[in-house]
Amino acid sequence: MAGIRTLKVGIIGLGFGIRHASTYVGIPQVRIVAMAEPDPTHLPVPFEELCRHYSARPYHDGVEMLENERLDAVSVCTNPALHRPMVEAAARKGVAVLVEKPMAGTVEDCDAMIAACERAGVPLHMEFPMRQLPALVELRRVIDEGKVGRPILVSGEYVGGLRPADHPWIWKMGDGSSPINENTCHIIDTIGFLLRDANRVRAEGGNFTGRGAPTPDGAVCTLHFDSGAVAAVSGGAIATDEMAVRPRLSLYGTEGQAYLEGIHHEFHRLVWARRGGPVVDKDYGGPKTLIYREGPYVAYSLIRPSLANFVDNVLNDRPPVVTGRDGRENVRICLAIVESIRTGKTIELRHPEVRS
């Protein structure tokens, strides 16, 4: 799409997609053309009013929107069980796709989305914004330049406060497939970005809060990587709203160590040192709040850099920062964590080719 100055964008699913809309309007190269929402009863304002606010045509069916509109790109923000038909429809129309995490509730749906986009030559971008935060980009550079040596051990924590009654689809296998797949996936992707390929998983956890959910609401797991590095992760949906989400990550290398901390889902501070060297401590500025409101219209600080990157990459024919295959790997690991909790077994992860 090199040469196009304005990206005509559609948004499907306005639960989280309303935050994509309020973010896109701050990107000069974007024009929101249409929005689709199958169940507008949960929106903070009437659906038609919302669409008028963004000068977008309203649809109740995302596939119909993709068939009728001439779009350059689409944000797919429905619950994960609906991602596959929307992505396949976008691929048929040659529309670049941004998929909200998690990619899907099953590996099979991930395979189908990747295959559809590859056959059509359509870029498939995953919305994992952590990788694009300045503190994490800098840590990746520190590792790549060998400043802390080879990573050997990582510990990370990312615990949210989701409630089963508020988001029942999150707890359903094959859809959200548990808060581990829906929310802890952020720290799993972060660790995967730093350590690359995981080859086995062992987890302990359960439904600790007794709120009747059918899938685990808390977990501790260990991951082993092809490089020989190991990681320990705490995650789930057992946090209090009062404390907010406070991600943290410690990394130890053969020649040094690093530490990330944050608030409101974002890493904003990086501290690192090489053995015998100075301590580098930089705060990139954390958000005072996760959500910014313009009346009923909601922006979400975490996704600002990643949506800007998506737009820039599509306009300039650059590859995704986070690919569909990255999204698939994340789903495989998160589902393996749930399976390990269920069976009490170590789950071996292999790296099969995506089935076309």
Image (cartoon, helix red, strand yellow):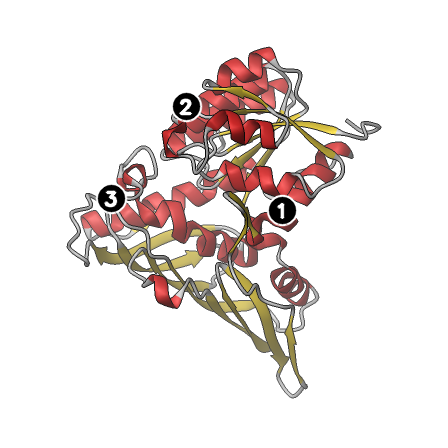
Separation of residues labelled 3 and 1 (CA atoms): 30 Å
Amino acid at dot 1 = Ser
> Where residue 91 sits: x, y (%)?
58, 19
Q: Are marks 2 and 1 in contact (CB under 8 Å)?
A: no
**In the image, residue 148 lies at what x, y percent?**
62, 73
Q: How many marks?
A: 3
Q: CA distance from mark 2 to mark 3?
A: 20 Å
Binning the other alpha carbons within 10 Å of mark 2 as few (below 14), some (14 to 19) or many (20 upward) gives few
* Residue 55 image-quadrant placement: top right
Q: Which amino acid lies under the numbered mark 2 shown in the image of this protein?
A: Pro
Q: Nearer the viewer, residue 168 or 104?
A: 168
> Does residue 355 show up?
no
* Whether residue 208 can be seen here: yes
Look at the numbered discs 3 and 1 and tell me whether their residues touch, using CB distance below 8 Å. no
Report which residue position mark 2 lands on: 38
Residue visible at 62% across and 57% down in the picture: 133
Residue 118 at x, y percent in the picture: 59, 24
Depicted 335 relative to depicted 84: above or below = below
Q: Could you say which disc has been placed on residue 306 in the image?
A: 1
Dot 3 corresponds to which residue?
165
* 10 Å crowding of disc 3: few (<14), some (14-19), many (20+): few
